[in-house]
């Protein structure tokens, strides 16, 4: 019998998720399994090409990406597909809020163990035919996350990967996560959403994340997240040319596109100029 070592299994190819920055900061709330199904479907799209009429995700794909047993993958996908039709997205264009459905068709094929999704014409521009103002990352990097809030925070941070920090207003964060009236007190928001998401990103996505608080009086109005890579997993996703066309070259003139709102843009410019606040790491939170 040969004593030669078994050849190492090849590393799985990255699964690139690419979204318009408008979608990254849009307001929506999905369950964990709905989030997983949506992202698995998006990872099958070529963001430079038109949207196909339907996107198919098999239970085998889902199981492989998220590390769940195949029988659980069937169950999770079926429930997620049933509920996705009712989920919507809220976007803001400066003149008002607009609601859009994610999909206009979601079908679970029992005999084939797969789901077919058809994204609406309103969501298509945020996922396909994209050439600028986009955020990309490897889905495998966040596949072990167990909170939809962690997924969303990771995406928001990936918008800012060239700077390594992000300044996000508390209300903008609440709106983006679709929290509605939940966690109105910042202490609750911090304990139930922010701290668990930051901890999970550190342990499961190899991203070192810390944050500082910005206050007006006793009220916390914004959070400055600082992050850096902890592992050999790159923040900037690189794919072979035959897998997918590369993203456009970085244009410094578009750096302001990572800002979530105009007021944040003004704050960020002040921060860059050294005119904005400095928050001590030792500074504790005051009661709301």
Image (cartoon, grey):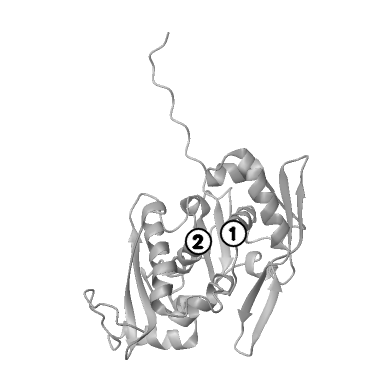
In the image, residue 86 above or below residue 142:
below
In x, y percent, where is residue 63?
A: 59, 42
In the image, residue 88 above or below residue 170:
above
Q: Is residue 238 visible?
A: no
Residue at point 52%, 75% (across, down): 182
**Circle 1 is placed at which residue position?**
35
In the image, residue 92 above or below residue 178:
below
User: In front here: 217 or 205?
Assistant: 217
In x, y percent, where is residue 199?
A: 37, 60
User: In front here: 168 or 174?
Assistant: 174
Label 2 or label 1, whichever comes before in sequence order:
1
**Circle 2 is placed at which residue position?**
151
Residue at point 46%, 72% (across, down): 251
- The quadrant the C terminus occupies is bottom left
- Left or right of 199? Residue 134 is right
Residue at the top extreme of this rendering: 1
Q: CA distance from mark 2 to mark 1?
A: 8 Å
In x, y percent, where is residue 12?
A: 51, 41
User: In front here: 5 or 167?
Assistant: 167
In the image, residue 108 above or below residue 236:
above
**Disc 2 secondary structure class:** helix
Q: Is residue 233 visible?
A: yes
Residue at point 71%, 45% (across, down): 114
Disc 2: CA contacts within 10 A as few (<14), some (14-19) or many (>=20): many
Residue contact between numbered discs 2 and 1, judged by CB atoms under 8 Å: yes
- Left or right of 3? Residue 177 is right
Disc 1: CA contacts within 10 A as few (<14), some (14-19) or many (>=20): some
**Disc 1 secondary structure class:** helix
């Amino acid at each position: 019998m040969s004593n030669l070592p078994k050849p190492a299994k090849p590393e799985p190819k990255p699964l690139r998720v690419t979204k318009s920055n408008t979608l990254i900061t849009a307001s929506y709330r999905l369950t964990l399994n709905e989030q997983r199904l949506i992202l698995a479907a998006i990872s099958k799209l070529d963001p430079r090409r038109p949207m196909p009429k339907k996107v198919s995700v098999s239970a085998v794909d889902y199981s492989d990406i998220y590390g769940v047993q195949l029988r659980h993958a069937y169950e999770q996908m079926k429930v997620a597909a049933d509920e996705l039709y009712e989920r919507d997205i809220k976007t803001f264009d400066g003149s008002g809020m607009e609601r859009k459905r994610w999909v206009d068709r979601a079908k679970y094929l029992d005999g084939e163990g797969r789901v077919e999704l058809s994204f609406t014409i309103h969501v298509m521009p945020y996922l396909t035919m994209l050439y600028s103002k986009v955020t990309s990352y490897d889905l495998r990097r966040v596949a072990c996350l167990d909170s939809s809030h962690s997924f969303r925070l990771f995406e928001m941070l990936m918008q800012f990967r060239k700077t390594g920090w992000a300044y996000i207003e508390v209300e903008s964060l609440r709106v983006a996560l679709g929290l509605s009236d939940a966690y109105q007190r910042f202490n609750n928001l911090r304990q139930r959403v922010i701290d668990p998401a930051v901890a999970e990103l550190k342990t499961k996505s190899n991203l070192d994340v810390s944050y500082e608080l910005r206050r007006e009086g006793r009220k916390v109005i914004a959070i400055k997240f600082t992050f850096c890579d902890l592992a050999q997993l790159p923040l900037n996703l690189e794919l072979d040319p035959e897998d997918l066309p590369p993203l456009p070259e970085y244009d410094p003139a578009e750096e302001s596109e990572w800002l979530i709102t105009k007021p944040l843009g003004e704050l960020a410019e002040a921060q860059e100029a050294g005119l904005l606040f400095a928050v001590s790491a030792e500074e504790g939170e005051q009661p709301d």
